[in-house]
Image: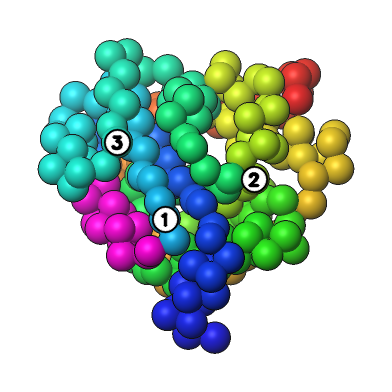
Amino acid sequence: MGEQAKTNQFNNKNQRITSIIAAYNEEKTIGPIIDVLKRVPIIEQIVVVSDGSTDRTVDIARSRNVEVVDLISNVGKGGALYRGLEYIRTDIVLLLDADLVGLEESHVLSLIQPVSEREADVTIGVFEEGRFATDLAQKIAPLLSGQRAIRTDVIQNISDMEVSRYGVEVAMNRYIRKNGVTMKLVKLPGLTHVMKEEKMGLMKGLRYRVKMYWEILKNSYGGGG
């Protein structure tokens, strides 16, 4: 089924979908991601949450006439997404990372369709045929992917999301597992993202990665859900 046919099918079902993007200093990639989302008619609302960004992330997002939540301090990805949820007015939420490269309308539709058609409560997108390093990381740990579509009533019930920081995907997965939420993995060919070491430099990027993995580990062995 082509992209236009998929879009028409969704439109006929009057689907209401919001995309939330948590962004921290992503001035190089946030614009193209928003541009792709705005070409998908079924996306009713786009909310960018700047997690204490100090670059032009906020200005670039605002220039594209989307809703922007500008947090003064960095609260981590989980806290940023939690704040974004306060603004949504739709039945399905599409979560995308702000550093994606190669995003296309087909990726967006592939994530949304199973949730829209009630095949699953949540989809998780897995990179393939992109860059070796990012493809490998997602083959090893596909459930840590940040590319997701999820029913609004499901994500709003994840109690520890606000304090999960960079372990937000783990918090979601724990809730999914404990509450019988149906999940489907979706392949996203050609999609990748900018690695932390490329954005920040080797040493700073490595420190940030260690911090991120520590947050993931804390949430993996924590409670909540």
Q: Amino acid at mark 1?
A: Ile
> Which numbered tag is attached to residue 151?
2
> Which numbered tag is attached to residue 43?
1
Asked if residue 199 lies left or right of residue 149, the reply is: left
Residue 104 in percent (x, y) is at: 37, 68
Residue 214 visible, this angle: no
- Between the C-alphas of marks 2 and 3, the distance is 20 Å
Q: Residue 203 falls in which quadrant of the image?
A: top left
Magenta extent: 29-41
Q: Which residue is mark 3?
A: 67
Q: Is residue 37 magenta?
A: yes
* N-term-proximal mark, 2 vs 3: 3
Q: Residue at x 85, y 34 (%)?
A: 178
Residue 153 in percent (x, y) is at: 67, 36
- By secondary structure, the bulk of the magenta-drawn segment is best described as helix
Q: Helix or strand or loop: what does disc 2 sit on?
A: strand
Mark 1 nearby-residue class (10 Å; few <14, some 14–19, many ≥20): many
Q: Amino acid at mark 2?
A: Arg
Which one is in front, 149 or 207?
149
* N-term-proximal mark, 2 vs 1: 1
Quarter holding the C terminus?
Answer: top right
